[in-house]
Image: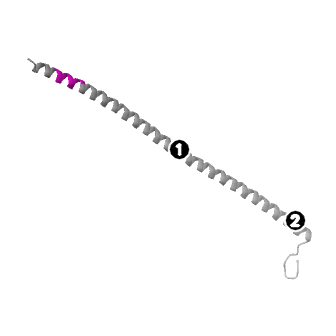
Amino acid sequence: MSESGTRLYTDLEIDLLIDEISEAALEAIEQAAGEAAKAAVLSMVEREAAMLREMQHWRTEAENNALAIQTARQAGRKNILLAALIGILGGLAVGVGIQNLRP
């Protein structure tokens, strides 16, 4: 100890302290790099999940639209058949009515 009460370190002790501090700093840097890599991977996974949710939304939308189109086509076919049937029956009724008017 010096006269002022502070401890004086030898060059060897200073070198050992520097080595310990350097080693601790390198471990902290490696740990921070690992955490940064984890954060980057999690960020990529979150983006992928968001894209998959968006794709699922559009797939569901497309399936719903396809179902609506199919339903509209079926309704259109029914309407065409009904119109044809009404036209045929109407024509028969008119024909029968004309036949009954003749003497």
Q: In what element is the residue under mark 1?
A: helix
Which quadrant would the C terminus be assigned to in this image? top left
Q: Is residue 30 left or right of residue 97?
A: right
Furthest-top residue in view?
103
Identify which residue is drawn at 53% across, 44% down: 55
Looking at the rendering, the stretch of residues picked out in magenta corresponds to 88-95
Residue 21 falls in which quadrant of the image?
bottom right
Q: Give x and y (percent) for residue 77.
A: 34, 29
Q: Nearer the viewer, residue 64 or 20?
A: 64
Q: Nearer the viewer, residue 47 or 58?
A: 58
Amino acid type assigned to the residue bearing label 1 in the image: Met
Q: Give x and y (percent) for residue 11.
A: 91, 70
Amino acid type assigned to the residue bearing label 2 in the image: Leu
Q: In what element is the residue under mark 2?
A: helix
Furthest-front residue in view?
103
Residue bearing the label numbered 2:
16
- Mark earlier in primary sequence (2, 1): 2
Dot 2 alpha-carbon crowd within 10 angstroms: few under 14, some 14 to 19, many 20 or more: few
Mark 2 and mark 1 in contact? Answer it, CB < 8 Å: no
On screen, 84 above or below 9?
Answer: above
Identify which residue is drawn at 10% across, 21% down: 101
**Which secondary structure is most common in the magenta stretch?**
helix
Residue bearing the label numbered 1:
55
